[in-house]
Image (cartoon, helix red, strand yellow):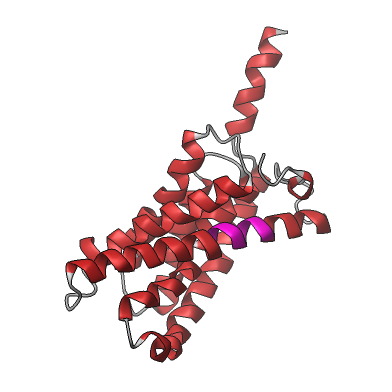
C-alpha cells in the first residue's frame, strides 16, 4: 500500500518516452515557427513607429512553446525544454539574433517553468497559464532591454515600457493562446496518451 502511494508522485514527475517525443515535436515545430516569424515580423514595424517599444506586443510569438509545452507534457522541465530547443532550432535554421537566442530560450523558458514549479506541477488552469505567459514575457523583456540591451536608443522608461508590452504579449499569446490550443487538441483526442488528455474537461479557473 505504502509503496503504491509513494510511486504515484514519482510517476507524475517522471518523463516517459512519449513525453520526450511529443515535447521534441512541439519544440522543433515551434523552432520552425520562430524562424518564419524572424523573417516576417519586421513587416509590422510601421504599426509601432509612433512608439517603438510597443513592438513587444508581438513578442509572444517567441514565448508560446514554454507554456504550451508545459500544459501538454505536464512534467518538470517541459517549459524550459520546449522553449530552449525551439530557440536552438531557429538559430540553426538561421536567425538574425545569432547565438543569443540560445540564452534567450533558456531565460524565457525559466519564466514559465518557475510558475509551474511553484505550483508543484499540479495546476494547469487558465489563470496559471496566463501568469506563466506573463512571467515568460517579463523575463524575455528584461533580457532584451537590459541584459542584451538590444535597444541602446531607448530611455529607461522606454525599456520599462518594452518589458510591460512583452508581458502583455506573453499573457495573451503564450498564456491564453497556449491554454486554448491545449484544450482544442484535447477535444480532438490528439493528447490521448498525455497527462493533458482531459484538458478540455478541466475547470477554467480550477
Residue shown at 51% from the left, 80% from the top: 36
Please state, as top left, top right, bottom left or bottom right, where the C terminus lies in the image.
top right
Residue 81 screen position, x and y as percent:
48, 51
Whether residue 62 is in magenta: the answer is: no
Question: Residue 114 placed where, x, y %?
Answer: 43, 42
Question: In the rendered view, does 51 fall on the left or right side of 131?
Answer: left
User: In this orientation, which residue lies closer to the viewer: 145 or 110?
Assistant: 145
Q: Main secondary structure of the magenta part?
A: helix
Front residue (pair 204, 12): 204
Is residue 42 depicted above or below 101 in this figure? below
Q: Residue at x 31, y 67 (%)?
A: 161
Residue at x-position 64% and y-position 29%? 11
Q: Residue at x 50, y 70 (%)?
A: 61
Evaluate whether residue 73 shows in this view: yes
Residue 178 position, x and y percent, is 61, 59
Question: Which picture quadrant has residue 28?
Answer: bottom right
In this rendering, position of residue 52 left or right of residue 201 = left
Q: Magenta region: which residues?
A: 174-180
Q: Give the number of callouts.
A: 0
Q: Position of residue 132 (x, y in %)?
A: 49, 50
Q: Nearer the viewer, residue 200 or 29?
A: 200
Q: Nearer the viewer, residue 23 or 205?
A: 205
Residue 148 at least partly seen: no
Q: Is residue 179 left or right of residue 58?
A: right
- Is residue 177 inside the magenta stretch? yes
Quadrant housing residue 48 = bottom left
Amino acid at each position: 500500500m505504502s509503496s503504491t502511494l509513494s510511486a504515484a508522485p514519482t510517476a507524475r514527475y517522471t518523463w516517459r518516452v512519449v513525453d520526450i517525443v511529443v515535447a521534441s515535436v512541439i519544440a522543433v515545430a515551434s523552432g520552425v515557427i520562430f524562424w518564419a516569424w524572424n523573417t516576417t515580423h519586421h513587416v509590422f514595424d510601421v504599426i509601432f513607429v509612433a512608439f517603438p517599444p510597443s513592438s513587444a506586443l508581438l513578442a509572444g510569438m517567441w514565448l508560446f512553446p514554454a507554456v504550451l509545452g508545459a500544459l501538454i507534457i505536464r512534467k518538470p522541465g517541459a517549459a524550459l525544454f520546449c522553449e530552449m530547443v525551439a530557440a536552438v532550432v531557429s538559430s540553426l535554421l538561421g536567425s538574425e539574433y545569432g547565438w543569443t537566442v540560445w540564452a534567450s530560450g533558456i531565460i524565457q523558458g525559466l519564466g514559465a517553468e518557475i510558475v509551474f514549479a511553484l505550483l508543484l506541477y499540479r495546476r494547469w488552469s487558465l489563470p496559471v497559464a496566463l501568469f506563466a505567459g506573463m512571467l515568460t514575457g517579463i523575463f524575455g523583456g528584461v533580457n532584451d532591454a537590459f541584459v542584451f540591451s538590444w535597444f541602446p536608443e531607448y530611455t529607461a522608461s522606454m525599456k520599462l515600457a518594452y518589458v510591460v508590452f512583452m508581458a502583455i504579449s506573453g499573457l495573451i499569446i503564450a498564456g491564453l493562446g497556449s491554454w486554448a490550443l491545449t484544450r482544442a487538441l484535447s477535444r480532438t483526442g490528439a493528447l490521448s496518451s498525455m497527462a493533458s488528455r482531459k484538458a478540455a474537461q478541466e475547470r477554467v479557473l480550477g
